[in-house]
Image (cartoon, rainbow, N blue to C red):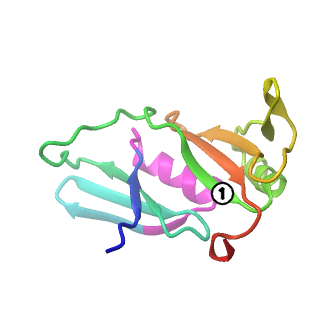
Amino acid sequence: MNWTLEVVPVPVTDLDRAKEFYAERCGFAVDLDDEVAPGMRIVQLTPPGSRCSIALLSGMPPMPGTKTTAPGGLHGLQLCVTDIEAARAALVETGVDVSPVMHVGPNGWEEGKGETWNSFLSFEDPDGNGWVVQEAPSELAER
């Protein structure tokens, strides 16, 4: 049996602002924007080419026995691209405050591209949830 990661909840304070950020600035596709029950809204978005989506939730009570993360408390979500410099340029063009391209060198983090699998950038959504983008040598389907 496969266990596929398909949806990651991202805690935000304002669904409309977050939806605009992820759709208009980051290029995520809006898969769903629905009030699933009175006062409970879900906005689901998917990064280009990804099989995993994010879910922005409002009014949804936590499932019994689970914990919640405060808006801005989610960090380390990672996206992969095949051209880190083009990805950075696309984010900058849409107004996302994005780090320089960096890699891990002998003395820690250094600016500039690294070797295969060693080029990264980072950005945050309007609530402060943190994302990392890593350059991969090829598309996922080819690896």
Residue 140 or residue 51, whichever sits in front = 140
Circle 1 — which element?
strand
Label 1 neighbour load within 10 Å: few <14, some 14-19, many 20+: many
- Residue at image position (69%, 50%) is 134
For the N terminus, give its image quadrant.
bottom left
Is 29 magenta? The answer is yes
- Residue at image position (84%, 44%) is 114
Horizontally, residue 112 falls left or right of residue 11, namely right
Q: How many marks?
A: 1
Q: Is residue 117 above or below residue 139?
A: above
Horizontally, residue 25 falls left or right of residue 87, namely left
Residue positioned most to the left: 64
For the C terminus, give its image quadrant.
bottom right
Specify start and end residues of the magenta stretch as a single range.
Answer: 11-31
Residue 139 or residue 122, whichever sits in front = 139
Q: Amino acid at mark 1?
A: Cys
Residue behind mark 1:
80
- Residue at image position (43%, 32%) is 73
- Residue at image position (86%, 44%) is 113
Residue positioned most to the right: 112
Horizontally, residue 34 falls left or right of residue 117, namely left
Q: Position of residue 3 (x, y in %)?
A: 35, 66
Q: Quadrant of residue 65?
A: top left
Q: Quadrant of residue 22?
A: bottom right
Is 36 magenta? The answer is no
Horizontally, residue 29 falls left or right of residue 86, namely left
Q: Position of residue 74 (x, y in %)?
A: 45, 37
Q: Quadrant of residue 103?
A: top right
